[in-house]
Image: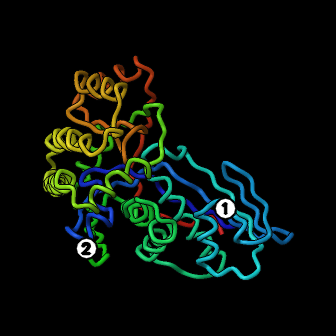
């Protein structure tokens, strides 16, 4: 049996500029942080022939074309299984649809496990690109590339997306004091809402492809905020970075009417009045997790707990997608 894991992630600046509809015209930049919450994949060869899948559903089929799970189906096809005899089980620390990039984490963990199953090596950047090929090219999802890359590479990482589809991967050059500061003062709270990122990103994708002036200007500005975030974090100015998160969120909300809702706005305002310097909704929007940078984290925790929002504490992961057992 082979067990792999991939980290989930939070975005720290520039999110949205990793969609092909934007970066192929203008180039993209963002900062993401892998966290120690994971998606796990087990792969083994069962005693009897067939494809056995255990995720939120159970599948037992004889042929690849019969597989209902689209990512698993395309991954098995990609590796050229001629006579499928494989069992795949998936688990996750946090469910999908919560804005932490679980789809990209799952795809990278699955591909890594299948490569080990076929006794083949794969490097992080190649792993990320194959995951992007499955989700974006083969399945046509209107998503970006950050989730696959940060899951594969891990760490606190800067990604530059070039118009020719090249991706530069560069670690964020921060001190250990800054890393500990971020782990102490970035607080993550679950809103209770889950949603499909595709439904919200589809709106951004359509507007970007049609050269909507407001959308393009918004993404230009968010990219600049990502670059400013890099400068502030590498200079150790974490409180200023926290304030920049607020500016990011204000612009992010303008991209789509489904980005926020009345409950999320109320919780965000409550956080800002109770110890937060800035914050935003992680991921495409519409639900998932609120991420705050706090200058009084205990006050913020008490305020969020009083309205029923559960905190998920985390540290950063610097290993990326890895094999736990083989």
Identify the residue shown where x is 68% and y is 66%.
43
Q: Residue at x 55, y 54 (%)?
A: 39
Q: Residue at x 55, y 64 (%)?
A: 109
- Tell me, yes or no, if residue 55 can be seen here: yes
Residue 52 image position (x, y, % from top left): 76, 62
Query: Camera-side residue: 157 or 30?
Result: 30
* Residue 230 appears anywhere in the view: no
Q: Residue furthest front?
A: 210
Question: How crowded is the residue under tag 2: few (<14 C-alpha within 10 Å), some, or many (20+)?
Answer: some
Q: SS at mark 1? A: strand
Residue on which disc 2 sits = 162
Disc 1: which residue:
42
Measured as percent of width and height from the top left, residue 275 is found at: 24, 25
Q: Dot 1 surroundings within 10 Å: few (below 14), some, or many (20 or more)?
A: many
Query: Would you place residue 202 above or below residue 258 in this image?
Result: below
Q: Which mark is residue 217?
A: none
- In this rendering, is residue 284 above or below 48? above
């Amino acid at each position: 049996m082979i067990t792999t894991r991939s980290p989930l992630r939070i975005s720290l600046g520039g999110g949205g500029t990793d969609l092909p509809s934007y970066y192929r015209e203008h180039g993209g930049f963002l900062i993401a942080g892998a966290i120690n919450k994971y998606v796990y994949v087990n792969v083994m060869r069962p005693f009897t022939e067939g494809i056995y899948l255990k995720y939120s559903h159970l599948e037992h089929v004889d042929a690849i074309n019969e597989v209902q799970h689209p990512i698993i189906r395309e991954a098995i096809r990609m590796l050229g299984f001629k006579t499928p005899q494989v069992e795949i089980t998936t688990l996750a620390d946090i469910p999908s649809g919560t804005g932490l990039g679980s789809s990209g984490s799952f795809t990278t963990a699955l591909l890594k496990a299948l490569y080990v199953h076929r006794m083949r090596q794969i490097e992080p950047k190649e792993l990320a690109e194959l995951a992007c090929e499955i989700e974006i090219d083969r399945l046509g999802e209107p998503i970006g590339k950050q989730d696959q890359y940060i899951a594969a590479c891990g760490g606190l990482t800067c990604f530059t997306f070039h118009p020719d589809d090249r991706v530069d991967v560069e670690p964020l050059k921060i001190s250990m004091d800054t890393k500990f500061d971020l782990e102490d003062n970035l607080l993550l709270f679950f809103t209770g809402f889950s949603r499909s990122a595709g439904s919200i990103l589809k709106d951004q994708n359509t507007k970007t492809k049609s050269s909507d002036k407001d959308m393009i200007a918004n993404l230009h500005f968010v990219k600049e905020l990502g670059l400013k975030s890099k400068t502030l974090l590498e200079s150790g100015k974490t409180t200023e970075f926290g304030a920049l998160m607020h500016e990011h969120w204000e612009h992010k909300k303008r991209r789509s009417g489904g980005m926020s809702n009345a409950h999320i706005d109320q919780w965000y305002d409550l956080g800002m009045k109770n110890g937060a310097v800035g914050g935003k909704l992680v991921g495409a929007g519409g639900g998932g997790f609120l991420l705050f940078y706090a200058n009084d984290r205990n006050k913020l925790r008490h305020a969020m707990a009083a309205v029923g929002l559960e905190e998920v504490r985390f540290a950063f992961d610097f290993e990326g997608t890895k094999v736990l057992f083989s």
